[in-house]
Image (tube, helix red, strand yellow):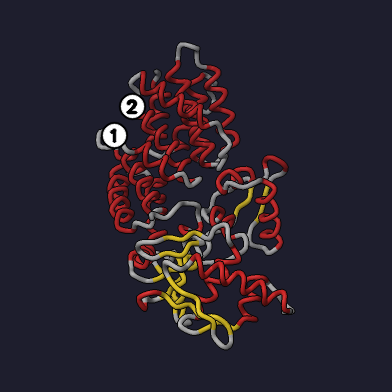
Amino acid sequence: MDSLITAAARALAAGDPLGALKRVALRDDAPALALRGIALAQLGDFARAKELLRRASRAFAPKESVARARCIVAEAEVALAARDLGWPAKALHAARVALEEHGDQLNAAHARYLEVRRLVLIGRLDDAERLLADFDPAPFPPASRALYELIVAGIAIRRIRAGAARAALARAEDAARHAAIPALTAEVQSAWHVLNTPAARRIARGEERPLLLEEVEALLASAALIIDACRNVIRDPRTTISLVTRPVLFALARALAEAWPGDVPRDQLLARAFGARFVDESHRMRLRVEIGRLRRILRPLADIRATRQGFTLVPHSEREVVVLAQPVEDENAAVLAFLADGESWSSSALAIALGTSQRTVQRALDALAAAGKVQSFGRARARRWITPPLPGFTTTLLLPAPLDN
């Protein structure tokens, strides 16, 4: 490898893309194309970066399998930064295997990081943890160790484990300081910000207040009966009842919990659960049926008693009743949660991350755009959506990840 290529690679490793471009901007050989692509990716020109990396991969000789694999890993990283979740994950896995077989452990580790970050992004935390289970970051340079700890912290945040997240971020901060890469340091600071801003709201006895992640964790471990509006479940330390597929029953349970220890008039329950403006006997009949269903489901945790005006929730063992609500409630809150990371997303990538149809996502984006909450740029397949992060809130509990039972 010639001196210019070596110097450009060192500049990229140090987070200096302009310094790298000064050395290889006018060259079209395969190594120079790859380095130019990585430099442009660091500068935010993802489309041009992907094109250069593909050209570099084709330009390397068939025998240069390691170089081709490195280009695939770099292209996967660009795709992840551009939120192109449709990029073939199998190609990244094959590249990682090739790098491991040829002894390039550093780039193989980076490929593993990218695989795990994609899994975390789409909420597949169990798969992400399995991929990290047998990995030891100690032998690798500070930048790689920082990336590893950021992933560990990200999983812990999704799992609502504040202590583990803070410990991982402290290690990531130390590794980033030794790496001396500004972009990596900024990513660590952004992760700290998530832990130091409200993650949810606590509603109890007619009062509401924001909760940090540690407070959410403590609440979930308490003896309280929790109506979890972030996950649409009802839980105490020993029992979890999911109402994800029963929105009417969950709406009734939440209304009863928000009024506890008082009762809720029947007309208010009808409005909350069914959106009924004008009440007739058929509505009252349906309410009795749904209350009966909810009473049977909640029998292990609480009872529902009729009062003169309506119904009241009576938990077993005289425990506290608390509603855990999202920090910002919106019909399209899940879409907003992903867009709030500050990155630009396509509707297809959002559909993959949310596990829903692209048309459903597009309708949500159109509604958010009409309300002035998101903006788009580009056309057709190149169209991307973005919104600035919501001030004062983190979106951890809005993202798709299961709570521990």
Marks 2/1: CA–CA distance: 9 Å
* Crowd around label 1: few <14 · some 14–19 · many ≥20 (10 Å): few
Residue type of the residue flagged with mark 1: Phe
Above/below status of 369 relative to 18: below
Q: How far from the left and from the top, in percent, is residue 348?
A: 63, 43
Pick the residue in front: 169 or 13: 169
- Residue corresponding to mark 1: 140
Q: How far from the left and from the top, in percent, is residue 167?
A: 28, 53
In terms of secondary structure, where does tag 2 sit?
helix
Contact, mark 2 vs mark 1 (Cβ under 8 Å): yes
**Left or right: where does residue 352 sit relative to residue 205?**
right
Residue type of the residue flagged with mark 2: Gln
Q: Is residue 326 visible?
A: no
* Crowd around label 2: few <14 · some 14–19 · many ≥20 (10 Å): some
Checking the image for residue 71, the label placed there is none
Quick one: label 2 or label 1, which is nearer the N terminus? Answer: 2
**Left or right: where does residue 390 sit relative to residue 7?**
right
Q: Is residue 122 visible?
A: yes
Residue positioned 54% across, 80% down in the render? 311
Above/below status of 296 relative to 64: below
Q: How far from the left and from the top, in percent, is residue 225?
A: 41, 70
Occupied quadrant, residue 112: top left
Checking the image for residue 105, the label placed there is 2
